[in-house]
Image (cartoon, grey):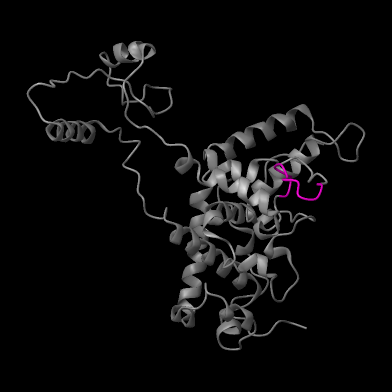
Amino acid sequence: MAVGPATPPENQTRLTTNPSAADLPPGPLPKTEWNFDPVPAAEIIACCWWEYARESAFIRDVHRRCSACSQPPGAPGNGLSCEAELRLHQDLQKAQSIGSAADIFLRGLSSAPPPLAAGEIPAMTGSFPQPWQTLAAAERQQRSHFGLEGKRIPFVPFQRGRVGDAKCISDGTKTPAAKAEPGREPVRREATALLIDWSDVTNDELVNCFRRWVKANRPPQHPVPSQKGHKLVDWRTNLTRLAVLRLLARFTARQLLVENAFPEIWQTQQFAGRKWDDVTKWYNARREARSVFQKLFPFLPPGELPLAWQRHYPANTTVFPG
């Protein structure tokens, strides 16, 4: 039977293995679902991508279909139809559209964790969607490299062109290279010819001239990237927001702040600030976690929300039933 893409959130089917925080029984959550204090700085970016990916029914469904596709012939539930394999390939391409960050949670997607000898460093395993903090230290280290790909491999945005760029330069004399032609993807890179007078201008004058040219010719579909939200403290803040989202799926703000139903949270650094005494900060953080989820994964089906967005009880519930 062919398996299609994940359905919208109101019809999401809960997976029976590796449950999300929203699937766990009512009551306190395991620390690995909400306490991100132990995550070291070197892992914080990858952890953020991984934990938010665990909140996606679409990404979990891709994982399930990859596992089914990799089963040996004759195994229960093995294989997919040709049509389902095509849809799986298309959905994987959607997930990979965000670039190298997708490798954090896609690498080893369909592989079962192999048995390891003492001291052996594991390869990428099919550990998704287990909590990040339950992964082997060596695997967390490997996956963290993908989160720092831009830092690990220096990117050179401006360099001398190659002979193969001549055609691009020639085409650029006919139409502005920075503009996308009808039916084609927007231009990401541009080759052009430069006429530089080294004799009569200083380096600073050349740089200022080039700066004016870049400002006038930057393609509108590629605005100047914002560095907001890319500091380690911002990634850690996003994890705290996710913790709030998951906690408010289990408890009401009144239970946490007034009834002290889960006192363990107040022993952590991430909830040490006085701002968490204000109930509005909790609901603001919950909404911000939803926004982060949607920004990290723009390829998700329209309307998909984090799994923990669905509360176990109405927001005004003060006591768990039963």
Report the residue at 39% width, 29% height from top: 188
Where residue 114 appears, x then y in whole percent? 80, 44
Which quadrant of the figure contains the N terminus?
Answer: top right
Residue 108 visible within the image: yes
- The answer to whether 235 appears left or right of 87 in the picture is left
Q: Quadrant of residue 320?
A: bottom right
- The answer to whether 154 appears left or right of 218 in the picture is right
Residue extending farthest to the front is 119
Where residue 221 appears, x then y in whole percent? 35, 36
* Residue 184 included in the magenta stretch of the image: no
- The answer to whether 293 appears left or right of 231 in the picture is right
* Residue 119 included in the magenta stretch of the image: yes
Residue 81 vertical position relative to residue 126 in the rendered view, above or below: above
Report the residue at 52% width, 38% height from top: 99
Where residue 73 appears, x then y in whole percent? 89, 31
- The answer to whether 10 appears left or right of 45 in the picture is right
Read off the magenta span: 116-127
Report the residue at 67% width, 46% height from top: 6
Report the residue at 45% width, 81% height from top: 274
Q: Quadrant of residue 96?
A: top right
Residue 117 or 155: which is nearer the viewer? 117
Q: Main secondary structure of the magenta part?
A: loop
Residue 87 or 257: which is nearer the viewer? 257
Residue 15 vertical position relative to residue 261 in the rendered view, above or below: above
